Structure formats: C-alpha cells, structure tokens
Amino acid sequence: MIISIASGKGGTGKTTVAVNLALSIKDANILDCDVEEPNAHIFIKPEIKSKEKVFIPVPEIDKEKCNACGKCKDVCAYNALAILGDTVLVFPELCHGCGACSYFCPQGAIKEVDKEIGIIEEGSINEIGFVHGRLNIGQAMAPPVIRVVKKHIKNDRVNIIDSPPGTSCPVISSIAGSDFCVLVTEPTPFGLNDLMLAVEVLRKVRIPFGVVVNRSDLGDDKTDKYCIEEKIPILMKIPFNKDIARAYSKGEPFVRCFPEYKDMFLVLLGKIKETIA
Amino acid sequence: MKVCVTSQGADLNAQVDPRFGRCRYFILVDTDTLEFESLDNLAISASGGAGIQAGQFIADKGVKIVLTGNVGPNAFSVLSAAGIEVFTGVNGIVNEVVEKYKNGEYNSSDGPSVDSHFGSK
C-alpha cells in the first residue's frame, strides 16, 4: 500500500503526519520525497546504510559531426538547446534528461553524459524503513531524484510518502501511483486556498484522498464547510497544542512523547484502508 | 538599420516591456523610416527557458540589436552567441527609445543585467 502525504500550502504539517503515522505502524516504510529540503530524517533518526548518487543524462555535442540542422532544438520541450549560426548551445540546468535530442539527431552527433543532480540515502530504525532524496544545491530538477526515491517502495509494507508542498511537477511525481493521498491543511484562509488547489490536482490524477486538519482549533470553520460541500472526508483533526509544538522544535515525533496519539493515527490508517478497500 | 524593442503593446506608442524572455511583443523597427513589424513572443508562456527561446526566435529573425529593460544570464548567452548587441535599462515609449538609441543615449551591455527567472517573478 502507498499512502502519500501532501498539502497545497507549506508548513501545514505533512512531515508531522507522515512521521507520526509511520511510527504508529510497526513496519512502515517512509519515503521523504521533498528532495529540495528533506526533513523526515530529523524526526525518524534512521541509521543510514546506503547512499546512491542520482544522475540525469544531458546532451554533449560532437562538433565534428554536428551540422547545426536544429532538429535537437526543435524537439527539446524545455528550451535546453539553442542554435546560433553553426553553434549549438546547451543549457544543462534546463535539461530534463528525456533523451529526445540524441534520439532525433540525424547526424548521431549527440552523446548523453551523466550529470549528478542528487543523492539517495537509505536506512532504517527498528522495523521502520527509511529513504530520502537530496537534490544538490543549484539543481532545479526534483522529479528525477523523486523517481529514484520511489524505487525503494516495498510492496509488503505500508509505504508513506512525504511529498513536497505545492501543486507542481515535484508533487505530481511524488503522489503518482499512490493508493491514497492525505492532504494536510490548517483552517486558515491560506490553508484553505491552497487545499482547494491540491484538491483540483488530486481529482485530475484520480487518486482517492481525504483531509487532515492540523491546528484544528485555530482559524475559522471555512475549511470544514468546504470539505462538507465538496464531500471530502475529514479523516483526522490535530488540535493546536504547545506540547506538540515543543516536541516538534526538538525534533521529537509527538507520538513518542504522547503515545495516546498513536491510536488516532491507527484510526486514520483504518479509515484510509476502508476507503481503498 | 533595424532594432528590436521588447514591448508591452504591438505598436510604436506602447511601453517598453522591461522583461526580455517574457515580454509581450518584439517590435522590429527600421531606425531610418520608423517602419515596424510586431511579433508575438511565444516564449512568454514557456514553463522554463523563456529567455533562451526568445533569444533563439529573434536571432532567427536576423536581429542584431536589442533594446530592453533586463536580460537574464541564459538569454544573454544566446544573444551574444548570435552576435546580437544588447542594450538594457531601456524604458519609456517604443518610438522615443528608438530616437534615444539613434542619439547614442544607451550603452551596450557586456553581461546579463539580472539573475535567472527575474521576468517570472
């Protein structure tokens, strides 16, 4: 089973929900796909056992063979190539590594060379599996790193994917293939606005989803009303509690400090299983 | 002589568009006759690499001189590889800036004037 934890707005509590849900289940596998700023490891504190570099193929032009026909530039969907006179300019930082340029080059003048863009670290703590990706500083292509993180999905486990915030490519890459997506929000105008954007995405990609409202006793009741109107299940509410905030600031998952919350997360898991059964 | 001005509108009375890669129009003006042609900038909706696409587009049109507000590093690489002279910090109405250019009031740039993604902020 694959459960992804997403949100529209950042800072609503995705990692909190992902980490505490994982720790409430015995043998979960947590995959931190927020490769631009992974933070689940701070709470999980896994022992890292293996590291693997992530590369994408970027074009290298053989000037002897190239006749500047422009085919590579025409097929590049990302504007990573330009042809000026008889010179081909390559912009590796815009390249998504799709390989279209070398595939279509009539002269066979394009060789793909590996460019390192990030690293994957895998480990575990007790029975919980852990993996995350880390995009190198200055790199912009999160999806290729996310795809490698997701190769560590284990079919016999409950896989919990901690997604990046927002609604763009890295989020789509993270949640793709999930059996269920939990949208974490907060009952504020920003939280609701971005929740609505995330709901649009999930309806488009057709992944079943429900909402967790964090800091549920702050803000207003507009999020509740929206979910009722849109027939979106509210799966769990986490109250605003200074003890939870204090634990978070120390890097302590709150189910470790307050084991009574484990039951709430198991109820959440039960509801998810019921929905996708 | 022909110059290319980035513009927010399709004629000579329009405001200069301060962005290069994501400007609305390129106006190609003959500095002697003031005859002009306006071209839609298709790169305005590019998800990335707008400056590169826009630079390629006007290089393919044979442009040699660009007057604009700002140019980012990728666009500047394309424009300089194409041998296009770039004048940044240009603002006002298109026909006025063409006049100022003729009077030698602008200095050509030897590097990008802003960082990447400036025009999409």
Image (cartoon, helix red, strand yellow):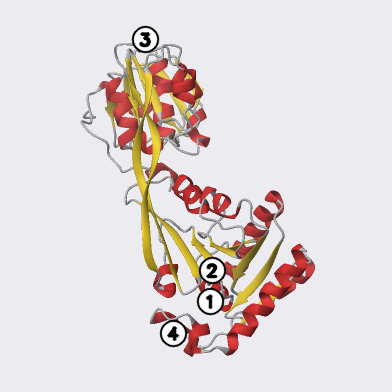
Between marks 1 and 3, how big is the CA–CA gap? 58 Å
Residue picked out by circle 4: A247
Residue A100: % across, % down:
49, 26
Between marks 1 and 2, how big is the CA–CA gap? 14 Å
Residue A138: % across, % down:
32, 48
Element at label 4: helix
Q: Amino acid at mark 4?
A: Ala
Q: Amino acid at mark 2?
A: Lys
Name the mark nearer the viewer: 1 or 4.
Answer: 1
Numbered tag placed on residue A67 in the rendering: 3
Q: Amino acid at mark 1?
A: Leu
Q: Chain of mark 1?
A: A
Q: With respect to residue B74, does A221 lie above or below?
A: below
Closest to the observer, A13 or B27: A13
Residue picked out by circle 1: A23
Residue A274: % across, % down:
76, 69
Residue B92: % across, % down:
37, 36
Pointer 1 or 4: first along the chain: 1
Label 4 neighbour load within 10 Å: few <14, some 14-19, many 20+: some
Residue picked out by circle 2: A14
On whether disc 1 and disc 4 are found on a single subunit, the reply is: yes
